[in-house]
Image (spheres, grey):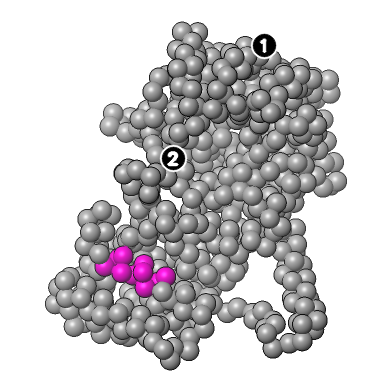
Amino acid sequence: MQTTKLSDAAFPQGPELDTAEARALLWMSDPQLHEALQASKDIEAARHNIMAILHERESRLHARDCQIHALERSNALHCLRVMRNFLSPRNERVSGTSVVHHLLCLEQDDGCGDVHPAFVHDILHIMKGTTGAPVLALQEAPDLTVMDEREGSRRRSDYLDGLAKAVEAKASRYVSGLEPSVIERRRKNRERILDHLNATLDDWNDYPWQMRNVLLSEEVIGDLIELTDSEREAIRLCGENRIPFGITPYYLSLMDREPSRRLDHAVRAQVIPPLNYIHGILKARADPSATLDFMREGQTSPVDLVTRRYPMIAIFKPYNTCAQICVYCQRNWEIEGVLSPDAMAPPEKIEAALDWFRDHPMVSEVLITGGDPGVLSNGHLRRLLGRLMELPHVRRLRLGTRVPVVMPMRIDPGFLDLMAAVHDPPGREFALVTHFEHPYEVTPEAAEAVRSLRTLGISVYNQQVFTMENCRRFETVAVRSTLKRIGVDPYYTFNAKGKEETSEYRVPISRLLQERKEEARLLPGLSRTDEPVFNIPALGKNHLRAWQHHDLIAITPRGERVYEFHPWEKNIAVAPTYVHMDVPILDFLIALAERGEDVREYESIWYYF
């Protein structure tokens, strides 16, 4: 029998709640559903009976005398649409699972042990939503229509002040690297690392020194910061099994010495992999049928080093390593090791790729990425960028690099001179796209690096991956706000990819949708310029907040919502869809509770589809 723990009044609770107890709560919450299933002899009868319930509820919502609040009614109609999707035989075929079958098993207690509480909780909340009953305890905004204009405006302003203060209080929970106490702590960290490496401050500020001294072993790293047993084991296994791993001295200085991860959780998690990640990588390596190319870049690579998914932009990957490796990177499976000496593509492949760009004048923008081409020498970069600058149809060059985050001293005078030569508007634009994950990564050094680029008129953008390390209430708001302070524009927020080996990082899509609507929406528009997206293997980015780009079609017995994502070509051309199984919402809430979060603050998550 499946059991779970979630001690909180906002959700059906245990403290130990097994599937049978969750089922009892479902029947209590929706007796009409229970009766319909009791009266069903088989799946088709159950499908018909549940559809009749949904039809009756929708008719009430459309009736002339419907008095349900417009917002509750809107939520109910969304829930009805989702439940109808669950009843679709076509969706059962596409998803490989049948919600009707699982519900009938619950009713008949037949195979109930295969159904997890996460499935029951999701159905319970969605079915409650179909009734139009209030599902959330929300404050009421001032009704300006019944007030004098001036009085109403003042009341509205007071109400908005309250919202702004709440946002500020929530976001301030997340400490940034710009705070004086953090700056001082990291100064001491730097001194400790320099003493250990017998180096000077001039060495520290020299990016080749940072690269020569990338930290690889648990012994050295463990001498500089305290590591947990699992962190030590993970680093050791990376070394023994040639799993790419390494930390620049600068980035290590961003980690707190003690191992609680209270403040530096996102920094440590960025580069120190969990053990199940390592086991997943080794399992995939041992399986000849497995592939770690989750994004299926091989299907969108017309020649080596080039990836093209969109009409007017293509990716150029001349350099296949980084100063350090992000655990959940979509391309880390291609990298042999940190700063691998043979990471530079052979000259003949680079020439073939450049010839391809020359032969495709419709490609007006090139993203140079990898790996991280930002760690190449200025000479190498000058030659590569110079060849692309020779192509008259390339009007924008974009460099994808994490050096402002992991090694900001790389943005040196030589690098800036090179960028200034490339950036020549209106004829050609140069832009830099980087990857800050958390305000704790934002430092005065990073701010200075960004400022030096912005002084040249170069735009700096951020792509954030939405993970367990930055998904708490207003945590990503803190990321956006801190980045805007140093001149970085939020660009994309990526839902963490569904790679099995990175399961500890993944967050339900509904949480990202909730964050966009209830948290990001409260910021000024220029602070929320990022777009939440799901990157579909081989197809490209799907804009999550637009329902016309995806459908929720099923829930597995484990409680995984099953989405069918539509390609960006929808309404332009016929292209395949992509089916994805998401993280169970209940599992996510339990993980949040284990991190000390009050999950009552997330209760609307069930109603984002």
Magenta stretch, residue numbers: 78-87
Queried whether the magenta region covers residue 80, the answer comes back as yes
**Few, some or many C-alpha atoms within 10 Å of disc 2 (few <14, some 14-19, many ≥20)?**
some
Q: Is residue 86 left or right of residue 300?
A: left
Residue 379 is tagged as 1
- Locate the C terminus and report the quarter of the image it occupies: bottom left
User: To which quarter of the image does residue 190 belong?
Assistant: top right
Q: Is residue 313 above or below residue 83?
A: above
Question: Which residue type does callout 1 highlight?
Answer: Gly
Q: Secondary structure at mark 1?
A: helix
Q: Is residue 273 left or right of residue 287?
A: right
Q: In terms of depth relative to the viewer, which is nearer, 511 or 600?
A: 511
Main SS type for the magenta part?
Answer: helix
Q: Is residue 484 above or below residue 563?
A: above
Residue 30 is tagged as none
Q: In terms of depth relative to the viewer, which is nearer, 571 or 299?
A: 571
The mark lying in front, picked from 2 and 1, is: 2
Q: Is residue 591 left or right of residue 103?
A: right
In the picture of the structure, the residue carrying the numbered disc 2 is 540
Q: Is residue 215 left or right of residue 586?
A: right
Q: Is residue 559 visible?
A: yes
Residue shown at the point (53%, 70%) measured from the top left: 603
Residues marked 2 and 1 touching at CB (< 8 Å): no
> For the view shown, which residue lies furthest in the left direction?
41
